[in-house]
Image (cartoon, rainbow, N blue to C red):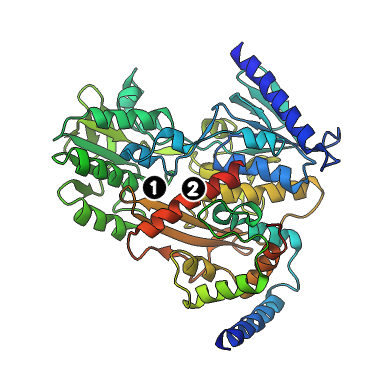
Amino acid sequence: MKRRQFIQGAGTGSALGAIGLMSGCASIGSSSSAKVVVVGGGYGGATAAKYVRMWSNYGMDVTLIEPSPNFISCPISNLVIGGSKTIADVTISYDNLVKRHGVKLVKDYVTQIDPDKRLVKLAGGSEVSYDRLILSPGVDFMFDALPGLKQAGAQDKVLHAWKAGAQTVALRRQLEAMPDGGVYALSIPLAPYRCPPGPYERACQVADYFSKAKPKSKVLIFDANDDVTSKGPLFKKAWTERYKGIVEYQGKHNAMDVDTTTNTLKFEFQDDVKASVLNVIPPMRAGDIAVKTGLATANKRWCEVDFLTFESKAAKNIHVLGDAIQIAPAMPKSGHMANQHGKTCAAAVVALLSGKEPNALPIYNNTCYSFVSAEQVVHVASVHAYDAEKKTMLTVPGSGGVSSEASTLEGFYAMAWARNIWADSLA
Amino acid sequence: MKHASALALGLLCALTSAHSQTQSPDPLQVRSWAAGCANCHGTNGRAEPGMVALAGASKDEIIQKMQDFKAGRLPATVMHQLSKGYSDAQIVAIASYYAAQKK
């Protein structure tokens, strides 16, 4: 009942949005306009929805299907765990996509995609047809790799907090409730996973909180990878200098199971570790709907795409974006990158639905900031260009790099980055 | 004077490499290249507070700045690394796009 009422509400909103834009765009409301459906309102999907509308001169019909009432940003959300930001600071409304851009927002969850009939089925019972589908499903977790987490209630006790939202707040509460002298243990899965530097930034944020509020406490990092996967020297400098005596890092620690009754982490080779607060990031793969639709063709985990259009290599008229794709070499699974995918895909979808060739030479960049304290920040940057021979995106030789050291100047730019990418994706 | 000659050289390089890569980049291609900057500099260059807005900026100034970042003449946190990912011709094309945007 509630859902139905919301859909009606959203419908009204988009109708008002369309009227608002009508004066400037004669093509709006045309019955012959192409129909684009976007599934998932994260960095990839929200950006694609906005830019298909913009770049079709508001001529193409765009429906965004997203179950969450608001966008909650993973980037910056580690600061909520550290305590210098609140979840409200990283929560943004979808209203501007509806009001300014005339995107039709449907608050629902896609249960099935029929690529032959070009139809998506929603949990609420309705169906939506498309000419082209843009799927930005993010990641889902492979809990089979950690059987203890599949038991009833286990996932409420041992958190991943790797999708910003309720778990982010819950992890902060666990840290607040932990007595001084406690141990926070963080388990990191083998790459590829969402946001390569994210776990290390989180360790810094928890250490920052401990250094101020619970100085006898420890942060133990158990990484399944051989070594820190991103900005290694910069993070290690923070751990050995700024958080000396608080943070301990160990690579080659592949977590195999979790006992949530005793808060114990079990490894492939090493001894068990018991912690006051256990934060386990499980291995991940493309979001369930992509796997279910048969799009996750790379190791049954990630969706292979044509990097000129982001069209799936497994299904026509379905484009896949963001963390769910089988990445190109050195392409991170980041919000910044998903936003770039969204724009590249939007341009291609508008071109293809207009009978034109998509752009032949995509070029875009990635900039990823990590907070090593509440104010000091380090970055990694890269530029990626399409290689026609190899048919993939490659980093441009000589470009990119990392910070020489952590600085508050980059802290200022990191927040400016956040404001700008949130606006570019959602406003 | 030094700057003017650097700019002239930059433009010459730009023209040369523009010729070798593509005769004149497709406007829609350039729009997509420029959109790659919008994550930080705002949609169509209209930036949120804290970042340099590119919309309606001088084309020559954008080119000059990018060339200075590339050459390490202008101190930067990130742009010295990102500017090196773009050819001179691409910089000219992107600068033209942003110069033509409404502030």
Looking at the rendering, in which quadrant would you find the C terminus of chain A? top right
Identify the residue at horizontal 24%, vertical 44% (top origin). Answer: A207
- In the displayed structure, does residue A185 sit left or right of residue B11? left
Residue displayed at 22% across by 49% down: A249
The chain identifier of the residue carrying mark 1 reads A
* Residue A15 appears left or right of A153: right
Going from N to C along the chain, the mark reached first, 2 or 1, is: 1
**In the foreground, B19 or A191:** B19
Judging by the rendered image, the residue that carries numbered circle 2 is A418
Q: Residue furthest top?
A: A1
Mark 2 or mark 1, whichever is nearer to me: 2
Residue at 60% in and 53% down: B42
- Whether residue A321 is visible: no
Q: Are marks 2 and 1 on the same chain?
A: yes
Toward the viewer: A36 or A292? A36
Residue kind at label 2, given as amino acid type: Ala
How far is the residue under mark 2 from the one under mark 1?
25 Å
Element marked by disc 2:
helix
The picture places residue B96, in percent across and down from the top left corner, at 70, 67
- Which residue is under mark 1? A191
Counting from the top left corner in percent of width and height, residue A38 is at 65, 36
> In the image, is residue A343 above or below residue A270?
below
